[in-house]
Image (spheres, rainbow, N blue to C red):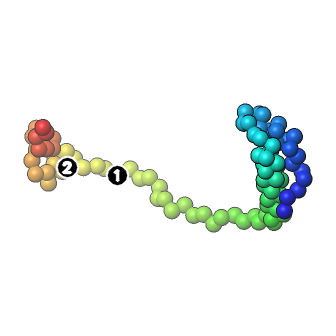
């Protein structure tokens, strides 16, 4: 599955750019792995492209402005009010 397209000199160059120290065993292993990765990319290039437009439909409704509640209507069902505001339990 491997290809000799990635040589150890390339691996050493990339390792130097990344400031990674590799011993010779790692250089050989990464050269093989890089070649495998490049081969996988070549395989992906062979996959035929399909073009299809997704059938998207806007499911959101348009915004409409409606009249809000009056202060008296909003407070009508509140258990307790004070001076035109909701009254909550004491904090602390």
**In this view, the mark in front (2 or 1):** 2
Counting from the top left corner in percent of width and height, residue 43 is at 82, 62
Q: Label 1 crowding class (10 Å Cα cut-off): few <14, some 14-19, many 20+?
A: few
Quadrant in which the C terminus is drawn = top left
What residue is drawn where x is 80% and y is 65%?
Answer: 47
Q: Quadrant of residue 83?
A: top left
Left of 5 or right of it: where is 63? left
Q: Which residue is mark 2?
A: 74
Could you say where residue 3 lies in the image, as x and y percent from the top left? Answer: 88, 56
Which residue lies most toward the right here? 4
Which numbered disc, 2 or 1, marks the residue that appears first in the sequence?
A: 1
Q: Is residue 34 visible?
A: no
Q: Give above or below for 23 relative to 1.
A: above
10 left or right of 87 in image: right
What residue is at 63 percent from the left and 66 percent from the top? 55
Residue placed at 49% from the left, 59% from the top? 60
Residue at position x 82%, y 53% from top?
32
Q: Which residue is mark 1?
A: 66
The quarter in which the N terminus is drawn is: bottom right
- Residue 39 location in percent, x, y? 83, 58
Q: Nearer the viewer, residue 25 or 77?
A: 25
């Amino acid at each position: 599955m491997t290809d000799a397209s990635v040589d150890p000199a390339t691996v050493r160059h990339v390792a130097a750019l990344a400031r990674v120290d590799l011993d010779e065993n790692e250089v050989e292993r990464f050269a093989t792995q890089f070649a495998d990765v490049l081969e996988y990319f070549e395989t992906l290039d062979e996959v035929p492209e399909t073009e299809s437009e997704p059938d998207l439909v806007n499911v959101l409704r348009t915004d409409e402005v409606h009249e809000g509640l009056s202060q008296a209507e909003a407070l009508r069902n509140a258990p307790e009010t004070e001076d035109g505001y909701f009254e909550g339990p004491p904090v602390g």
